[in-house]
Image: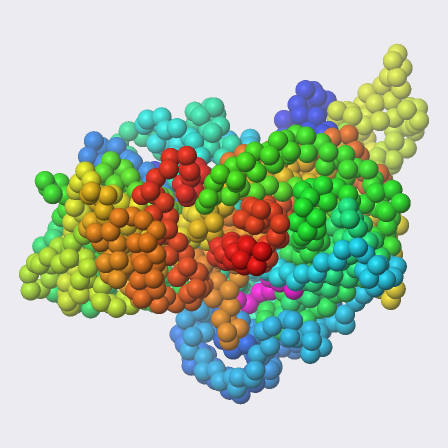
């Protein structure tokens, strides 16, 4: 039995299969067909809905998600807002009114999702003004594909929301809603779907269901349900385990709980690792960043995960816990082979340690993909180094997309270690890179492209270090 | 009806007192007629329509092999799966098993031979979609693989065609080429494109009480769905009713390729007696349906010292996939547009529709035109580099012009001055030449980033090249409260067709737009319709609707002249009133009163309208004629910046000036132009179809197939309609079609990328750049230019 609120009204759903998505629940069980299925893989945004999560000060904070790859059970104790829940009778919500006024729908199929993404932005605007620049609109709408309009009228609508009459949704006036939602608490009983809130309970469930899959943001796991039609017998949801949600600062760095979402990580990275933060904005879409977790990105062990190369370059390590107790492991030792990790049976990632930046250590992160937003890397290079007496030291060069796992380029690092950043050293590095990796051809890029582009990222690195301010060496300045 | 409604009731529409409200003037730009439904989630798409409780859901079993003999199809386990109600293969089809739209070749379900990976083999109806999809996986399928032909060039050489090649020729091309002071030749690969309509293929079939069926489908061509369903079920057309309310995007992908799914659903509905839904999951949709044709094009052209074309030879090879579908007309249209806006001189254009073991490639916005145009735009750039001129200079010199105004297929280009004017306006408004100098200076001092600029024109022929399709019908009812219902043969896929047609009727009857409602397109209201395609939706259906409205108007005028004893000559309908006479003698009668009086006077308030496009003809045997009623024009200037180390790039500014004649709805037209441009840009940049060596699609979802996102929209995007140039032909209020032509404005992005790359060789070499110009292709092009420059220098 899950209990949640839908557009301000209490809902109870009994006996949902563990693999039920929010979208299936909405369309098939609740006959709310305003939310559309475009891809069932979290890549198009047609199914975008808003989740209101009660925070400590008793308010509901709304974020966008892809309903198609969000487990329905994660609605427990949340307020789900769909496109049907915004207008007040005939009076359109400001987002909707702006969309009509700006001719921002053509076929209209992506429109409900776009309205909901803009709704979350509008809610944020109500709390505190946000500059509606291109970067903000991209961050909000980068995961909402529209095949008709070319997006310009949608940008315009986003900027015209504030000029509309301030119509609140019908549930918007109900002051007790946040409390009512919070009072629902967490999942009490659901067949096949467990949602522990303490680490102790998580350990107990792991013992009870040793073969159960772990799920956090579900942004990858749920593709097995929607694309490969897997029925999960048991799932253990770690997204609400208190201990996995903390970010603990230490003098040397931060322990980041495995269930911390990318969105929650953003402010920390903005402050301390702007290059990492920039990459984060190109990881998936707002809907994905609102769900996806650092722990999931690592445990998934994909060769094209975006954060592992950066964490490798920064010497991150992991706190693991399992039936045989807790241990720490350098991330370098975690990835064994394609989608194979050093996790023992029953073990899970509790937290990731991100070292604090030191004054003279630099980080550059460059992601190459066909499309800038919401795309998976063909190649991702994360480069960390410090410069002393004109020479490079502690050179860490980690790549994604170049091998079966994300990993560092040892020979290339060795070619640069202790060398001045000149053409000779980088020529040697380029040659070493060809020994470090023999990448594969796939849909995202040919082996030859990956090899050449990765080598050219070294050249970009050289030009960046050998900085001539008058010359632009990459397109970062053109990203808006 | 015993009494007439009280017109003072607020629900009754429209009243004279509403005169201050939005005027029924097509110059106004009312929003899409479904805009409020879209933004509230109330607009119903196929899969949102309620169905009876016992409705079944269909999943389709697809071949994983591109070519082979189907030796075993064991479906017992599928049939036995709990929740499965019916399973069909080709032997269960009572009527036609081939659903080829124009020519045969499209088996509804595979028989003995499998001809592409993704081909439907069987269909399963079950109590829900997941059950049906899981059951599909239980089939035991054995296919003896045969060699798959995946290369259209090799297919063309082996004379593996879906239709015979076609030639258009004007003058002695060989002679012109031989005599020209300069000659160039090049090959160009032009990639295909997945439609990626956000709503996938979907339909709902409801069995009727007799042997018939009602089919709701997301299709651009209801009449063809009706025909094919009737043929597959072996029942008369009148037993099949097809309804299309709206599509969640079509773009050509639902012109022919919505029909097979409707046929399967209709067959299962008839067999089970239950309502049947069929909605393809995205991956199945991408694997099973055809796309924009990839083309392999070649030119050999001769030109004079000024870069003016003298003549030559162009060949376009379309990768049609396994069957003809619409490929003959698509390859034809690539040929019709191989000149784009330029006089080719004495030229021959050859089109070859090659047959491969691929999904049957199909209509997609532009219908082959974009692929044809790209070859001559490439030639313009190549000539400019060869002569050391700016590409814009070369383009302008080659535009159709007085004395050089006849195409290679014999049609005279009317409004020949318009294109020159349009380009010179855009040249000035985009500040082309100053930006050209600034870019040259930037590139000279920037080692990694290079900027590029290009202006490319579009001249696009409007009309179906299949002459008989250039007709349309409409059905108009005036009810006794004065409200008006118009139905026409066109379908709404987001392009605002219903909004425009509603405006036309409102304008003819002098009513507000809100007084006119458009219902779903239905084959039992307007029969024998053409597909909504070829940009012709408003041109044809708007004219048919106008024709119906004019009949009603004339009847009402005749009635009013007699009934109210008014002067028939000076009558008009405006602002919700019939107005007769002028000045002192002016009489006004409210529309509602007029309609009620006419009803009581036993005047028919219903009319069917019809339209057929005049003037057009094309003789396929000679490759000459006037296939197009008129041309639509436009031009775009795009600026890009390229990272020559990674191949990444951004489109930083785009200026567009586009000709829609006298616009029917400027807001909708701008939406078509911007949306078409971005879709075209996606085709030429990030949208890459990838197939493995066995012919299986690997870019089979939005995770791997990348259409533009909001961040790809140029940060500086200036779009304007060309003012003051009504259509020279008597089109609908002198407007021009707008659906397809702007798509090709995006060629300016590709050309600008080549311009940026050319800077690596000091603009002396013209880079090869196949499409889509992904970062990978751009990087390799940059690498090739750098190496060529090194080689050149070392030889010097």
Q: Which residue occupies 14% across, 43% down?
A: A253
At x 37% / y 66%, what residue is drawn? Answer: A439
* Coloring scheme used: rainbow
Image vertical order of residue B329 relative to residue B80, above or below = above
Which residue is drawn at the image coordinates 52% and 40% (left, top)?
B444
Image coordinates of residue A363 in percent, x first then y, are: 27, 45
What is the magenta range? B287-296
Q: Position of residue B19 (x, y in %)?
A: 70, 21
Q: Which quadrant: the N terminus of chain B?
A: top right
Residue A203 seen in the current view: no
Q: Is residue B353 visible?
A: yes
Q: Front-most of B595 and A477?
A: A477
Q: Is residue B644 left or right of residue A318?
A: right
Chief SS of the magenta region: loop
In the rendered image, the residue lying farthest to the front is: B796
Q: Could you tell whether B251 is left or right of B74 in the image?
A: right
Residue A380 % position (x, y): 34, 54
Tell me where residue B50 appears, x and y as whole percent: 51, 54
């Amino acid at each position: 039995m899950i209990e949640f609120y839908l557009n301000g009204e209490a809902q109870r759903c009994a006996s949902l299969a563990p693999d039920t998505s929010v979208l299936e629940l909405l369309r098939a069980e609740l006959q709310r067909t305003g939310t559309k299925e475009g891809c069932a893989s979290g890549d198009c945004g047609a199914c975008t809905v808003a989740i209101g999560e009660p925070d400590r000060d008793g308010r509901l904070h709304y974020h966008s998600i892809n309903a198609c790859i969000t487990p329905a059970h994660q609605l427990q104790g949340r307020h789900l807002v769909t496109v049907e829940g915004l207008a007040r009778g005939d009076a359109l919500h400001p987002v909707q009114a702006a969309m009509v006024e700006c001719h921002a729908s053509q076929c209209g199929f992506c429109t409900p999702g776009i309205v909901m993404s803009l709704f979350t932005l509008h809610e944020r605007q109500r709390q505190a003004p946000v500059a509606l620049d291109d970067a903000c609109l991209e961050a909000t709408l980068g995961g909402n594909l529209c095949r008709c309009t070319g997006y310009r009228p949608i940008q315009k609508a986003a900027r015209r929301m504030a000029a509309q009459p301030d119509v609140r949704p019908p549930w918007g006036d109900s002051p007790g809603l946040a409390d009512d939602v919070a009072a629902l608490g967490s999942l009490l009983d659901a067949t096949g779907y467990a949602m522990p809130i303490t680490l102790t309970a998580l350990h107990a469930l792991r013992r009870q269901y040793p073969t159960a899959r772990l799920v956090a943001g579900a942004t990858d796991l749920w593709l097995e349900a929607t694309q490969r039609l897997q029925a999960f017998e048991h799932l253990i949801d770690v997204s609400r385990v208190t201990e996995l949600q903390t970010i603990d600062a230490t003098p040397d760095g931060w322990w980041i709980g495995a269930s911390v979402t990318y969105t929650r990580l953003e402010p920390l990275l903005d402050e301390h690792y702007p290059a990492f933060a920039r990459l984060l904005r190109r990881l998936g879409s707002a809907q994905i960043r609102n769900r996806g977790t650092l722990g999931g990105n690592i445990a998934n062990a994909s060769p094209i995960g975006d954060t592992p190369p950066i964490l490798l370059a920064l010497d991150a390590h992991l706190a693991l816990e399992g039936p045989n107790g807790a241990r720490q492991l350098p991330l370098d030792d975690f990835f064994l082979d394609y989608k194979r990790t050093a996790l023992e049976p029953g073990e899970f990632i509790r937290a990731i340690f991100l070292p604090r930046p030191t004054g003279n250590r630099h980080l550059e992160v460059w992601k190459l993909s066909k499309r800038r937003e919401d795309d998976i890397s063909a190649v991702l290079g994360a480069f960390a180094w410090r410069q002393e007496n004109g020479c490079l030291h502690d050179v860490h060069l980690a790549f994604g997309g170049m091998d079966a796992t994300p990993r560092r380029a040892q020979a290339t690092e060795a070619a640069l270690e202790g060398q001045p950043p000149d053409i000779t050293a980088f020529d040697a590095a380029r040659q070493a890179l060809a020994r470090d990796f023999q990448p594969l051809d796939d849909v995202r890029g040919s082996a030859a492209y990956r090899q050449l582009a990765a080598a050219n990222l070294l050249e970009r690195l050289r030009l960046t270090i050998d900085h001539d301010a008058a010359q632009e060496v990459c397109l970062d300045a053109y990203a808006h | 009806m015993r009494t007439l409604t009280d017109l003072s009731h607020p629900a009754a529409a429209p009243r004279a007192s509403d005169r201050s409200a939005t005027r029924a003037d097509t110059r106004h730009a009312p929003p899409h007629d479904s805009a409020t439904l879209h933004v509230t989630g109330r607009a119903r798409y196929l899969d949102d329509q309620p169905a009876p409780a016992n409705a079944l859901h269909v999943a389709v079993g697809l071949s994983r092999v591109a070519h082979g003999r189907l030796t075993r199809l064991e479906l017992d386990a599928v049939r036995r799966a709990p929740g499965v109600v019916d399973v069909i293969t080709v032997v269960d089809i009572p009527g036609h098993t081939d659903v080829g739209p124009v020519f045969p070749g499209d088996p509804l379900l595979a028989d003995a031979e499998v001809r592409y990976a993704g081909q439907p083999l069987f269909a399963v109806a079950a109590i829900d979609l997941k059950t049906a999809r899981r059951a599909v996986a239980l089939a035991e399928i054995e296919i003896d693989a045969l060699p798959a032909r995946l290369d259209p060039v090799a297919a063309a050489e082996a004379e593996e065609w879906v239709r015979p090649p076609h030639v258009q020729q004007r003058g002695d091309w060989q002679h012109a080429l031989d005599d020209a002071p300069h000659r160039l030749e090049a090959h160009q690969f032009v990639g295909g494109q997945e439609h990626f309509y956000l709503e996938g293929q979907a339909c709902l079939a409801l069995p009727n009480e007799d042997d018939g069926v009602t089919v709701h489908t997301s299709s651009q061509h209801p009449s063809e769905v009706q025909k094919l369903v009737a043929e597959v079920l072996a029942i008369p057309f009148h037993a099949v009713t097809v309804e299309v309310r709206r599509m969640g995007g079509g773009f050509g992908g639902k012109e022919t390729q919505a029909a097979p799914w409707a046929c399967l659903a209709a067959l299962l509905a008839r067999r089970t007696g239950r309502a049947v839904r069929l909605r393809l999951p995205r991956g199945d949709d991408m694997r099973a349906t055809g796309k924009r044709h990839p083309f392999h094009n070649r030119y050999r052209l001769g030109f004079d010292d000024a870069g003016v074309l003298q003549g030559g030879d162009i060949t376009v090879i379309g990768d049609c996939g396994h069957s003809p579908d619409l490929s003959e007309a698509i390859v034809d249209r690539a040929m019709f547009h191989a000149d784009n806006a330029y006089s080719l001189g004495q030229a021959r254009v050859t089109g070859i529709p090659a047959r491969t073991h691929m999904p049957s490639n199909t209509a997609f916005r532009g219908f082959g035109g974009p692929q044809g145009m790209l070859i001559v735009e490439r030639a313009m750039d190549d000539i400019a580099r060869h002569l050391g001129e700016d590409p814009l200079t070369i383009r302008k010199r080659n535009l159709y012009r007085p004395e050089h105004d006849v195409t290679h297929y014999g049609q005279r280009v009317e409004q020949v001055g318009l294109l020159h004017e349009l380009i010179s306006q855009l040249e000035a408004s985009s500040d082309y030449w100053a930006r050209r100098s600034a870019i040259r200076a930037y590139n000279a001092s920037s080692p990694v980033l290079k900027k590029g600029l290009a202006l490319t024109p579009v001249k696009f022929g409007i009309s179906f090249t299949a002459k008989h399709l250039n007709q349309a019908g409409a059905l108009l009812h005036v009810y006794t409260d004065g409200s008006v219902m118009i139905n026409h043969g066109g379908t709404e896929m987001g392009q605002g067709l219903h909004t425009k047609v509603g405006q036309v009727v409102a304008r003819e009857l002098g009513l507000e737009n809100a007084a006119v409602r458009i219902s779903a397109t239905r084959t039992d209201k307007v029969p024998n319709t053409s597909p909504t395609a070829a940009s012709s939706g408003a041109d044809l259906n708007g004219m048919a609707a106008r024709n119906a409205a004019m009949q009603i108007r004339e009847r009402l005028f005749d009635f009013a002249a007699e009934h109210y004893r008014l002067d028939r000559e000076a009558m008009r309908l405006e602002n919700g009133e019939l107005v007769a006479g002028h000045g002192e003698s002016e009489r006004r009668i409210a529309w509602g009163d007029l309609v009620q009086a006419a009803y009581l006077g036993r005047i028919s308030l219903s009319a069917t309208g019809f339209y057929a496009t005049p003037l057009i003809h094309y003789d396929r045997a000679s490759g000459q004629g006037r296939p197009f009623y008129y041309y639509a024009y436009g031009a775009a200037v795009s600026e890009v910046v390229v990272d020559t180390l990674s191949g990444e790039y951004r489109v930083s500014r785009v200026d567009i000036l586009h000709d829609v004649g006298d616009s029917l709805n400027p807001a909708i037209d701008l939406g078509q132009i911007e949306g078409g441009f971005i879709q075209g840009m996606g085709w030429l940049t990030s949208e890459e179809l990838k197939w493995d060596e066995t012919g299986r699609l690997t870019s089979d979802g939005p995770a791997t197939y990348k259409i533009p996102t909001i961040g790809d929209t140029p940060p500086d995007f200036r779009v304007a309609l060309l003012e003051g140039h009504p259509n020279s032909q008597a089109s609908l209020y002198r407007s021009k079609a707008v659906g397809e032509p702007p798509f090709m404005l995006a060629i300016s992005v590709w050309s600008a990328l080549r311009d940026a790359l050319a800077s690596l060789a000091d603009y002396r070499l013209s880079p090869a750049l196949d499409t889509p110009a992904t970062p990978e292709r751009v990087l390799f092009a940059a690498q090739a230019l750098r190496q060529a420059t090194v080689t050149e220098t070392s030889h010097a």
